[in-house]
Image (cartoon, rainbow, N blue to C red):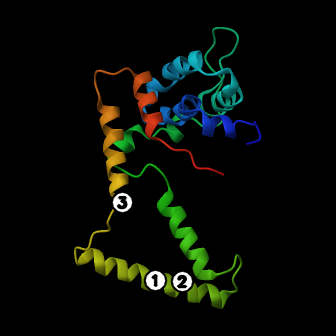
């Protein structure tokens, strides 16, 4: 919102897809990210230049004026690339850790509990985990949202499509990705 792009993003689907194409790069093999980024950059809308510049500086690395390689980005591609995890159907995020942290924080009901409150919270957490273990041993599977399953299948189909270019894959992924609103 600081860049004044929120309205354009919400009202112009083509612009929104271009913005979403940047995080979609993370689904490509790491070696294909930079060449595909360069293709995106060539077609990126002028209004989105601040976003593109931010992404390039932090996640791709800026080209130097000479023919030298790009400067190292703040976050190396290997840190945010999810291609292998997606293909192997592994977790792509640390949402499980974040979920646990949120649940544990709500158990504590405060940011800095005293020792006794902390100990009581740990006991509650242990009971919860033991119940989950019993359910898992009994063969109870946690259900996944059908829409999430369909989305994962679509992502895998796009990634594994041999006849499309990486640019086409990224643009297809950008159609099904959503960015959290803040």
Residue located farthest toward the left when viewing the structure as drawn: 139
Q: Compare residues 99 and 12 and report the one nearer the observer.
A: 12
Which image quarter holds the N terminus?
Answer: top right
In the image, what residue occupies the spot 59% across and 29% down?
15
Residue 9 position by quadrant: top right
Q: Left or right of 64: which side holds 28?
A: left
**Which residue has dot 3 on it?**
145
In the image, what residue occupies the spot 37% across and 43% down?
86
Numbered tag placed on residue 122 in the rendering: 2
Judged from the image, the secondary structure of the residue bearing numbered disc 3 is loop
Crowdedness near tag 1: few (<14), some (14–19) or many (≥20) residues, C-alpha within 10 Å:
few
Q: Left or right of 28: which side holds 105?
A: right
**Which residue has dot 1 on it?**
126
Coordinates of residue 164 in the picture (x, y in percent) = 33, 22
Coordinates of residue 16 in the picture (x, y in percent) = 57, 34
Residue 41 position by quadrant: top right
């Amino acid at each position: 919102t600081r860049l004044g792009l929120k309205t354009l993003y919400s009202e112009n689907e083509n612009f929104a897809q271009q913005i979403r194409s940047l995080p979609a790069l993370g689904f490509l093999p790491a070696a294909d990210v930079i060449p595909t980024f360069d293709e995106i950059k060539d077609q990126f809308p002028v209004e989105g230049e601040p976003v593109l510049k931010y992404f390039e500086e932090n996640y791709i690395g800026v080209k130097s004026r000479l023919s030298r390689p790009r400067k190292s980005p703040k976050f190396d591609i290997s840190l945010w690339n999810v291609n292998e995890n997606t293909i192997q159907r592994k977790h792509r995020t640390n949402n499980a850790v974040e979920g646990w942290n949120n649940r544990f924080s709500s158990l504590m009901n405060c940011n800095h509990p005293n020792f006794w409150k902390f100990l009581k919270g740990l006991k509650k957490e242990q009971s919860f985990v033991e119940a989950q273990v019993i359910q898992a041993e009994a063969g109870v599977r946690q259900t996944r949202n059908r829409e999430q399953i369909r989305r994962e299948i679509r992502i895998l189909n796009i990634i594994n499509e041999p006849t499309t270019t990486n640019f086409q894959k990224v643009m297809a992924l950008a159609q099904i990705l959503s960015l959290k609103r803040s």
